[in-house]
Amino acid sequence: VNGDTIFVENADLIALDKTGNADPIAAAVTMDYSGSMGFTDLANMEGAMKTFVRLKENRDEIEVIKFASSVETVQEFTNDTTLLMAAIENDPRVGTFTAFYESCRVGLESANQLNNVIPAVIGFTDGGDNNSFISLSGLIELAQEYQIPIYTVGYGSSSAPQNLEVLAEETGGRFFLSPDGQGVQDLYETISGQLRKLYLVQWLNSLPSGTVVVISITTTYTAGNGSFTDTVEKTFVIN
């Protein structure tokens, strides 16, 4: 795909439709309160989270999850801005270690239970993890299974961006490092744009039921600061 032009190999194209998804976004947001996050880091993270809540559309829902040694769901999914702001200001009692991957797993599980929404997980963290039962690779596999992207937002002086970048890239999300007010707006617009704007490709299928098919899609996007290309693969079974 390059703009609205599509090139199809080894398939008979029926239609390509540029469409949108009117369902609300449901974002499970995890917030890092581990010992490696300093006072300024926490203040910046909470400020960014409040900005994100203010930017959301009225129907969009957010779940607030806070973590350190343990994981606590402070506010389940809601579109109520007042409840979300109160949850952000809630002082958690979750220890000092870091269960970041576990917090994302909790977010994936809860988002996967919802219907008629566009699910996503957003992780605000310094990138470390020393107290999760699930590994980085296990978390990536689970997100891919559920088809839910994880967006990562790095804060903290000991931020480990390499793991956050891998987690975002492998699950279809994006990585942001210490965004300011404009950066948080870019974060929301990126998530909204990626999840709500879709291409629907239809092609003729002559394969028998039960056939395992691997689809490889290469996309090229041209913007003011250059061209970007990415290839993803998806495996499914013909019904």
Image: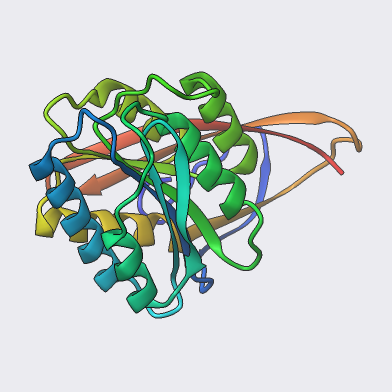
Q: Residue at x 8, y 44 (%)?
A: 40
**Residue 94: where, in percent of width, then height?**
38, 39
Q: Is residue 224 visible?
A: yes
**Residue 4: where, in percent of width, then height?**
41, 56
Q: How many marks can you see?
A: 0
Answer above or below: position of 107 versus 157.
below
Q: Nearer the viewer, residue 110 or 228?
A: 110
Q: Nearer the viewer, residue 207 or 214?
A: 214
Specify the quadrant of the image occupied by residue 168.
Answer: top left
Question: Farthest right residue?
Answer: 209
Q: Is residue 20 visible?
A: no
| Left or right for 150, reference 39 | right
| Left or right for 158, reference 59 | left
**Residue 22: where, in percent of width, then height?**
51, 74
Quadrant where the image shows the N terminus: top left
Q: Nearer the viewer, residue 203 or 97?
A: 97
Answer above or below: position of 155 versus 121.
above
| Left or right for 196, reference 163 | right
Q: Residue at x 21, y 28 (%)?
A: 36
**Residue 125: where, in percent of width, then height?**
28, 37
Q: Residue at x 36, y 44 (%)?
A: 93
Quadrant where the image shows the C terminus: top right
Specify the quadrant of the image occupied by residue 11.
Answer: top right
Specify the quadrant of the image occupied by residue 15.
Answer: bottom right
| Left or right for 96, reference 209 | left
Q: Residue at x 53, y 71 (%)?
A: 23
